Amino acid sequence: MKNRLKIAVVLAAAALAVTGCSGGGSGSGSSSSSGSDDANVAWVDKVCSASLNAVKSLSTEPQLDMSDPAKLKTGFSEWLGNGSASVDKSIKELEGLKNGPHPDSEKLVNSATEVFGKIKTALDDAKKAIDAADPNDPAAIAEAFSKVGTQLSEFAKVGTDFQDTFVQSNLAEAEKKAKNCQELNKTDTTSSAPTS
């Protein structure tokens, strides 16, 4: 059951890290195609900043008591609730960035908020499933963890598609220069290997 929990945690963090514009993309487009380079870098930095808290929240492995199913259930439910609140905050911050300097600013923000909205829904649904699981039935809790992992793994492709949109909009270079995107990339790298 602990391995399933780790998988769910890693999948949640990975999905958010990918959607938050991390990874630098594989394109080599120039960000100077529209708007000034500095304005695009500043805007992209804000997009990454809006994503950063949610990514950090979901990248932090919950401290769970694996020997007590009731405490395990409560701890994971709290982690999911905190993650959902962080994602909701990111969505609200992103909404304020629709009027960026790039012609695709609104399209990119809409893509990001759509992905984050789906992740929030998955977290909320997962929390409901965990909360409904019988703490005296380890198999029910394990099944709930498995569903969490399945739900969140579906967002990896969506996140990759969003990253491709970012690259296709010729903002990959701006992302590389943005301080918060660099921080997001570091968070993505360190989130992939839970330690406990």
Image (tube, rainbow, N blue to C red):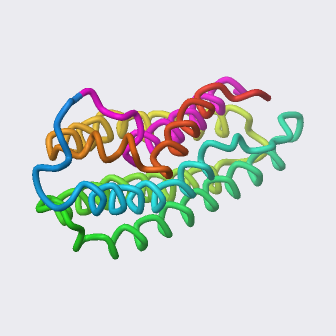
In front here: 13 or 79? Answer: 13
In front here: 45 or 30? Answer: 30
**Quadrant of the image occupied by residue 7:** top right
**Residue 3 placement (x, y as % from top left):** 67, 23
Asked whether the viewer can see residue 147, the reply is no
**Would you place residue 7 above or below residue 35 in this image?**
above
Q: Residue at x 76, y 54 (%)?
A: 74
In front here: 177 or 94? Answer: 177
Q: Is residue 26 left or right of residue 5?
A: left
- Magenta region, residue range: 1-26
The image quadrant where one finds the C terminus is top right
Residue 9 magenta: yes
Q: Residue at x 61, y 34 (%)?
A: 191
Q: Is residue 102 left or right of residue 179?
A: left
Q: Residue at x 62, y 27 (%)?
A: 4
**Quadrant of the image occupied by residue 190:** top right
Q: How many marks?
A: 0
The image quadrant where one finds the N terminus is top right
